[in-house]
Amino acid sequence: MSVGPMAGSDARRVCLLVEDQVATREWLRALIGEAYPDAEIIEAANRREANQWLDRYRRSPEALWLALIDLGLPDGSGISLIYRLTQEFPETLSVVSSIYDDDTHLFEAISAGAKGYLLKDQDKARFLNYLRRIELGEPPLSPSVARRLLTYFHQKARPAGTIGTTVNLTSRETETLTLLARGLTINEIARNLDLKSQTVASYVKTIYQKLNISSRAEATLAAVQRGLA
């Protein structure tokens, strides 16, 4: 991991780039540098490196301006990093940079606090344009992602408050739903709750049945409607 000096009050804006593929990381670093020549770019190849750097950076959270985060990291999903940034670095603009173009990853990222979602299969000029427009206050969304959001809320999403909000969940089911919405896997939820993976899987099945849902995206929306995410 490339770690620059800690930023002080007079430091340049800091960008955290989390990407495990070396060639892709170099490509993204070059794009960030071209879009924002004055930025200090910190690189991490996985969640562990990113978390270690964030642990040391807590004293100056306001200087961390942008975080560009891959979701498919070798030691787990980048969703947990987005959630941590949302909680501990609320001023940071968390943007997904991913190959995943599906409802589950998209809505998990948004629920965790992502402010943008860019697909890495775009050409350089288009990706660079989205990065530059961040400074103008425009949420960076790849066209297919923007269409997916519109389609979901216009055609698939049920009216607010209708995904089983009157259905009672047990405390364990509520905890499980909360962690599902944060993007944790079954095994990660099991470790968090000190339970067996099979037990958590059973909770998830029960939650889906009670709320009459069939996907993690719907589970995330249900958690949002219940104020859990």
Image: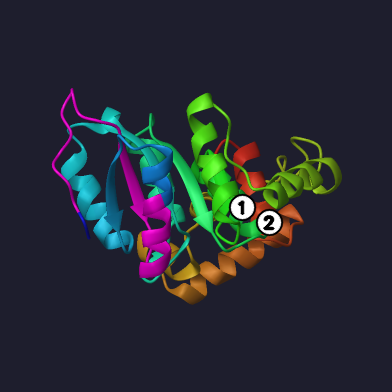
Q: What residue is disc 2 on?
A: 103
**x, y percentage for residue 212?**
77, 56
Q: Secondary structure at mark 2?
A: helix
Q: What residue is disc 1 on?
A: 106
Camera-nearest residue between 94 and 158:
94
Q: Relative to 54, does residue 201 appear above or below in the rendering?
A: below
Q: Relative to 26, does residue 108 appear above or below in the rendering?
A: above
**x, y percentage for residue 66?**
39, 39
Q: Name which quarter of the figure residue 216 lies in.
A: bottom right
Q: Relative to 114, does residue 19 appear above or below in the rendering?
A: below
Residue 7 visible, this angle: yes
Q: Which residue is at a point 29% across and 46% down the rendered structure image? A: 41
Q: Label for residue 65?
A: none
In which quadrant will I find the N terminus? bottom left
**x, y percentage for residue 16?**
33, 46
Q: Which residue is at a point 65% across and 37% down the rendered structure image? A: 225
Camera-nearest residue between 136 and 195:
136
Q: Which residue is at a point 29% across and 55% down the rendered structure image? A: 43
Residue 21 visible, this angle: no
Camera-nearest residue between 104 and 26:
26
Q: Is residue 6 left or right of residue 219?
A: left
**x, y percentage for residue 33?**
36, 44
Instruction: Look at label 1 and name its amino acid.
Output: Leu
Question: According to the image, what is the colour scheme of the structure?
Answer: rainbow
Instruction: Look at label 2 and name its amino acid.
Output: Asp
- How far apart are the alpha carbons under marks 2 and 1? 5 Å
Looking at the image, do the residues carrying marks 2 and 1 touch, with CB atoms under 8 Å apart?
Answer: yes
Q: Which residues are magenta?
A: 3-30
At label 2, counting other C-alpha atoms closer than 10 Å, the crowd grade (few under 14, some 14-19, many 20 or more) is some
Is 173 a magenta residue?
no
Q: Which residue is at a point 48% across and 44% down the rendered structure image? A: 95
Q: Secondary structure at mark 1?
A: helix
